[in-house]
Amino acid sequence: MKLGVDMDDTVAFSNRKLIETALLFDEKYVNGRGFKNRDGKTLLDKFYWNVYHVEQFLNVLPKGDYFLSLDVKEEANKYITKLCDEGHKVFFITRRNKSFLLKMKTRKWLKKNGFKYNGIVFGITNKGEYCKAKGIDLLIDNDRRNIDSALGNGVDAILMEDDYNKDLVGYNRLRNWKEIYDYISGVK
């Protein structure tokens, strides 16, 4: 089976680290007021920032250690490696931009954390179309828009449960990589 796997908040705890880094950025470069709304969906909702602050933050983010210091989601590397060892093809499909520095840091993070995989592609904004074009059988992602795109293109999809999608209904939602592995093993 060909699997398309998202990176951020699917195999790496990105959002948690993003918020920690944003708080440091806020303290150092903006106004140091902290959260406007801790439960906000975007950086503009969460902080007392304007669009300029968000752009500034997103421009400095890839230059630091953010992408190298992300924690692995529980046993993601173990189960993805197991899937590869069993003959499945795993392709990371990420919206992360195509900058050389970010590609290098992403690959370094995957290697450092022991991930086995068959390929990685960057800058994909329509994951459903990409999966269909590349013959991906199953997309695993935490973003409902990507799941909807995959399903709309006839590609099976699993929504990786996360804090900001836990209230969504009508999706094939799994909580962790053990559940995903068991699902895929039963689908073979």
Image: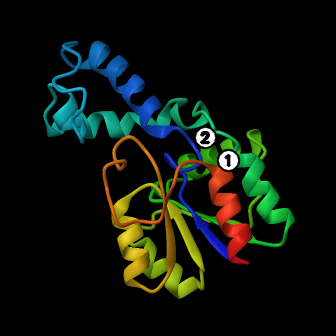
Q: Which residue type carries mark 2?
A: Lys
Numbered disc 1: secondary structure: helix
Residue 7 location (% of width, % of height) = 55, 52
Residue 76's label in the rendered image is: 1
44 left or right, relative to 15: left
Q: Callout 1: few (<14), some (14-19), or many (20+) C-alpha neighbours within 10 Å?
A: many
Residue 92 location (% of width, % of height) = 61, 62
Q: Quadrant of the N terminus?
A: bottom right
Q: Is residue 188 above or below residue 119?
A: below
Numbered disc 2: secondary structure: loop
What's the CA distance linking mark 2 and mark 1? 6 Å
163 left or right, relative to 101: left
**Tag count in the figure?**
2
Residue at 14% in and 25% down? 48
Residue 25's label in the rendered image is: none
Q: Quadrant of the C terminus?
A: bottom right
Q: Is residue 132 above or below residue 178?
A: below
Residue 99 location (% of width, % of height) = 50, 53
| Residue 140, visible in the rendered structure | yes
Determine whether label 2 and label 1 are within 8 Å by CB: yes
Residue at 37% in and 75% down? 149
Residue lying at the far right of the rendered structure = 85
Q: Label 2 belongs to which residue?
A: 73
Q: Which residue type carries mark 1?
A: Ala
| Residue 90, visible in the rendered structure | no
